[in-house]
Each structure stands twice: as structure tokens, then as C-alpha cells.
Image (cartoon, helix red, strand yellow):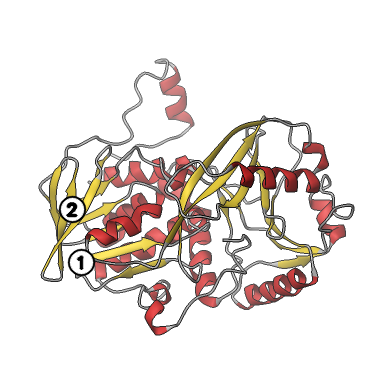
Amino acid sequence: MKKKYSIYSLVKNSLSDNQNWKKMWRNPEPRKFYDVIIVGGGGHGLGTAYYLAKEHGLKNIAVIEKGWLGGGNTGRNTTIIRSNYLWDESAHLYEHSLKLWENLSSELNYNIMFSQRGVLNLAHNEHDVKEIRRRVSANKLNGIDSEWVDPHQIKKLVPIMNTENCRYPVLGASYQPRAGVARHDAVAWGYAMRADELGVDIIQNCEVKKIRTAKGKVQGVETSKGFIRSNRVGVVASGHTSVLAATAGIKLPLQSKALQALVSEPIKPVINTVVMSNAVHAYVSQSDKGELVIGAGTDGYNSYTQRGGYNIIEDTIRAIVELYPIFGKMKMLRQWGGIVDITPDASPILSKCEVEGLYFNCGWGTGGFKATPGSANVFAHTIAKNKAHKINAPFSVDRFVSGRLVDEHGAAAVAH
């Protein structure tokens, strides 16, 4: 029976001191065989399992997670959602995702706290101005809400910003009103709950150690709970995807680096939009609790740690204080890092490979969270049909052989 959340259910359970809420999902032991195994229990993996069951009628599905749900990059990001990418291929993928975001709370009957507060991408020099104006025009041609705003308009949106008396003066920005933020762990929980209701086994604390293949076909996965057979395996393991791919004899063009973020002490509302700056590499929004959520850049070296270097923190805080002088005396509460996997063209891989029945969803760099529902939706189609959806067809791993790259280094709005 579908678990429903409403005012009635809140009142009813408050009368029992909230002791009678049903568990959101089961905690089953793995079966010996599944029609599809999804490796990775983040938003992309759980969403893929949900759409496989809901839209493609598959029931014997497992999501295998080595830790807890949402404990990887899904819970280690700055929650920014937008679709204002430069190239047609990227714009179609991220806009597909944004449209799913807009109705996701209703579809899952779970409040993912999606707040369409808009996103500004700042221009600090003439190159930025030309590049961002070009991107605004490209967005409009693809039907994406995007506009150029001047410093006067920026000050109206963000009065606390220092636009002139700084090392990199603000010359303008692109603005996407439909963009915003969402509660990252709520996305994982919502997908997990609904996937479980559709019969998906969600297996936590189960590490996949090896993908077993034979004669060019996938056989299943070796895990810390034993071997689990399957003829179809989708790997959605973010920074560790290349490690797992190697166990199947696949070499993916990925580099894994730590991407850092910080959260400040809570304060009263002072910024009601998301502001991103590539030149000084610092982006900021304010959470519903009042904390400043601050995004930094990737470390300059490959790593599988979830911590990162202190020099990145220092550079980010320096940039934030210069753009927003009133933040100078604030205290930071915590800092963390996620492991991002980056491709040569800064665009994802959503593709099958030369091993029959083996599929990869990876290479998102800093753009993974915003793509969650769209990525999961088209990846589920690819696994179910063994054929790429038209939206993710350009993101095949074969593009690194053919040379048909989707180069989003500049338009990603952050420096990889």
C-alpha cells in the first residue's frame, strides 16, 4: 500500500507521539538472482530503479549500496538545480530533468523542498560577458528561461552583493528564474520509498567488490554478502565508477577529485536566490534553516577522500567575503567533500558498453545533483530497452572514440 503523507496523517500520528509511522522501506537480504542490479544507492541509482519499475514494468530489481542511502554525492553537494547549459545536447538533458523536478514532490508524495528561487551566473570580465550572453541566446533557442541582467538588476535581486569595489567587479549575469535548490537527502528518501513499494530490494551496507563477466556478457556482482547473479547491471557509483568498471575490464575516461562545500551558522534571510561565480569560484545560497550553503571547487589532484585541501576552503572564503562583505565575521559550522568523476569534456556518460548487459551512469563532475530525475529516467530507458533514449544518446562512451564531444567546461559555470 502506498504510504501517503498529508495533514491528516501528520495529525493522526502526532496523537500517538509519532510512534506508529511505518518504515519507509524494507531492509531485505539479497536474493540469488535479479533481472537488474543497480550499483549505487544515491539519487541517480534509486531513481533509476524507480523508473525501471514504474515505467518499464520490471519488478525483480535490486539497488546495492555499500553504505547508507544518500551517503555519497547525493548528500554531499550544494543542491543547486538549473538547466542553462550551452550545447543543445546538455540543455535537453538538464531541461528534461528540471521539468521532472517541478512535479517530483507531487509524483513521489514526498516533500523534496524544491524551491525555484532562481540562479545567477556572474560575469566579471569581458570574456565572461561574451560567453554568458552567448549561453543566454543558446538557452532561449532551446526554450529555456534565461536572461541577461545588468549590475543594477543584480543589486535588486541581491542587495548585499559588492558589485564594484572588488578585485573582480560584477559586470552582469545570466539569470534563470525557474532554477533553484532542493533537499538532497529527501530526494533519495522519496525515490527509495516509492521504489520499495514497487518491489525493488534496497540492500544497504553491501559493498560491490567486482563485476563478474564471461564471454563478453555480464554475469552479476561479487559483494560483501556473496555473489548475486544478474544479466543486467547498471553502475551509478559516482567517483568509484571507474574502479568498478576496471574489474570488468572496462577503462573509462574519468578522473576522480574531491569537491568541497561549507555551511555557515544560521542567520536571518539575507539572500533569496543562488549566486554562482566562476572567475572567483564561489557560489552561495541560503537554506531554509538560515545557513549559508557555500560551494567551492575541486582539488587540483586526483583523490578518493571525502575531505579535500584547506587551500580550497581559504580561497573560497576569501572570494565569498569579497563579494559579500557582511559575511566577514560569520562562523563556518562544517565542511565536507564529495568525490566527483570528471570526463575530458565535462559531460556525463549515460551508456551501455562493449560488455553485454553492463551500463554506466557517471562522469557528472559538478553537475550530478541537478540532473538526478532526468538522468535516472533516461538511464532506466537505456537499461530496459538496451537502447539509448534520444536525450542521452549523445552521451555514449563511444564519443571519446568518434570525437563527437559535448564540451561543457566553460558553460558548467564552475571550473573543473
Sequence-wise first label, 1 or 2: 2
Label 1 neighbourhood size at 10 Å, few (<14), some (14-19), many (20+)? many
The location of residue 308, given as percent across then percent down, is 53, 44
What's under tag 1, amino acid-wise? Gly
Look at the picture and state if 123 lies above or below 402: above
Q: Is residue 236 visible?
A: no
The location of residue 50, given as percent across then percent down, is 32, 52
Look at the picture and state if 208 lies above or below 10: below
Q: Residue at x 68, y 58 (%)?
A: 177
As measured in the structure, the alpha-carbon distance from the residue carrying label 1 to the one carrying label 2 is 12 Å
Q: Is residue 194 visible?
A: yes
Look at the picture and state if 186 lies above or below 381: above
Q: Residue at x 27, y 37 (%)?
A: 205
Say which quarter of the image contains residue 225: top left
Q: Which residue is mark 1?
A: 357
Q: Quadrant of the N terminus?
A: top left
What's under tag 2, amino acid-wise? Val
The location of residue 232, given as percent across then percent down, is 20, 61
Left or right position of 178 against 2 = right
Element type where label 1 sits in the image: loop
Q: Which residue is mark 2?
A: 221
Q: Nearer the viewer, residue 125 or 28?
A: 125
The circle drawn on residue 212 is none
Q: Nearer the viewer, residue 20 or 6?
A: 20
